[in-house]
Amino acid sequence: MLARSCLRSARSVGPAARNIASKTASRSASSSSSSAEEAASSWRTKALSGGSLAVAIGSVAWYNYQYGMSADAMTPAEEGLHPTAYPWEHKKWTKTYDHSALRRGFQVYREVCASCHSLARIPYRSLVGVAMTVDEAKAMAEENEYDTEPNDEGEIEKRPGKLSDYLPSPYKNDEAARAANNGALPPDLSLMVKARHGGCDYIFNLLTGYPEEPPAGAVVPEGLNFNPYFPGTGIAMARVLYDDLVEYEDGTPASTSQMAKDVVEFLNWSAEPEADERKKMGWKVLAVTSVLFGLSVWVKRYKWSTIKTRKLVYNPPVGGAKSPFKK
Ligand code: HEC
């Protein structure tokens, strides 16, 4: 059976194959340019398939180059060491700034950082009730001189500071600041906690993270100091905090980490003076909205109760329904 069907198919294929063979033979005999034509068409086919392959490989490679690889902008050393996370008290939902810490932190800023860093967005008035009394703030403002408005002759004179004045900057302008710091600009600290990735943790680690000696193999360019937390590890600011550098009036031991913690909390206040208000408002909003939520659940249940407790009953007529079409 199998053999017979094989024979049959061979027979039916036979004439067709013969036909094709004779056709190609006759075609090649009929024209002399046909072999050149064939060569050209096979070249075109090869070029087309080769080209599309190249385009396909190229676009996959381009896509991978653009989106495929995980791109690290910088090496870990260039990024800086990730700061350790600390449980900052003032960041907790139910906590406020510790005003003794703010007062100590402002003292550290004034006695240590203020010789290089400005705090230009903070007026004396905003320190009142936060880090000092009105009288203390007034006395401090008066220690500095500010320009007056031009008088009738257009002259600008000097006057003692007022509560509405802003804290003075250590340098006249950025160029003077750079000139005094080996070309590096000590940035304004008013918004520093918000301006750096890691915020409080970063600044704390930066201030306390200077090793005694740079580790073996570290390359520290001339005029820079090694700090693993600073992106690039070479920072123009040298270590500034040392134990007992300031004397706290409340008797808190002025260790390096205590001063760093206090000044960081103070800088957090200067960047977010509204934080306590915001948390208080947040709690009020939560209290009011949770009462309203409870109330709205009750109202919804009240309004829907008649619908939800409704019972639909169908009583079929006794003896079966009468069809209108039936007589
Ligand atoms: C002797 C001058 C000087 C003193 C004092 C000083 N700094 Fe700096 N600080 C600098 C300079 C210069 C830079 C810029 C560093 C750089 O770009 O390499 C800087 C940069 C910084 C930065 C920014 C780092 C960054 O990520 O860009 C912070 C934050 C900072 N200082 C905080 C402080 C605090 C807080 C104090 C006081 C406890 C202080 N500094 C005292 C000179 C000083």
Image: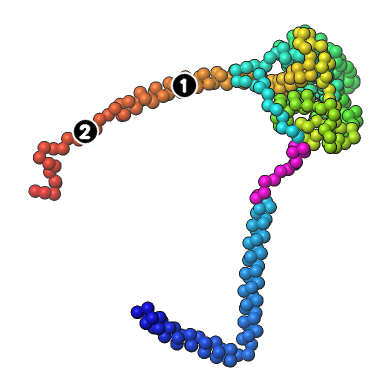
Kindly state the secondary structure of the residue where label 2 is placed.
Answer: loop
User: Do we see residue 125 in this rendering?
Assistant: no
Query: Looking at the image, which residue is at 73% across and 43% down?
Result: 73
Q: Residue at x 67, y 56 (%)?
A: 61
Query: Which kind of residue does numbered mark 1 sit on?
Result: Leu
Horizontally, residue 317 falls left or right of residue 254, namely left
Residue at image point 58% right, 89% down: 28
- Binning the other alpha carbons within 10 Å of mark 2 as few (below 14), some (14 to 19) or many (20 upward) gives few
Judge by depth and name the residue closer to the eye, 145 or 66: 66
Residue 172 in picture, x, y percent from top left: 87, 26
Q: For residue 74: magenta? A: yes
Residue that mark 1 sits on: 292
Return the x and y of residue 273 as percentages of the image width and height.
Answer: 69, 20
Q: What span is colored magenta in the figure?
A: 67-79
Q: Give the percent coordinates (x, y) of residue 44.
A: 64, 75
Occupied quadrant, residue 171: top right
Coloring scheme used: rainbow
Where's the N terminus, which quadrant?
bottom left
Residue at horizontal 13 percent and vertical 37 percent from the top = 317
**Kind of residue indicated by mark 2:** Val
Distance from Cα at disc 1 to Cα at disc 2: 37 Å
Mark 1 CB in 8 Å range of ligand 1? no
- Mark number displayed over residue 313: 2
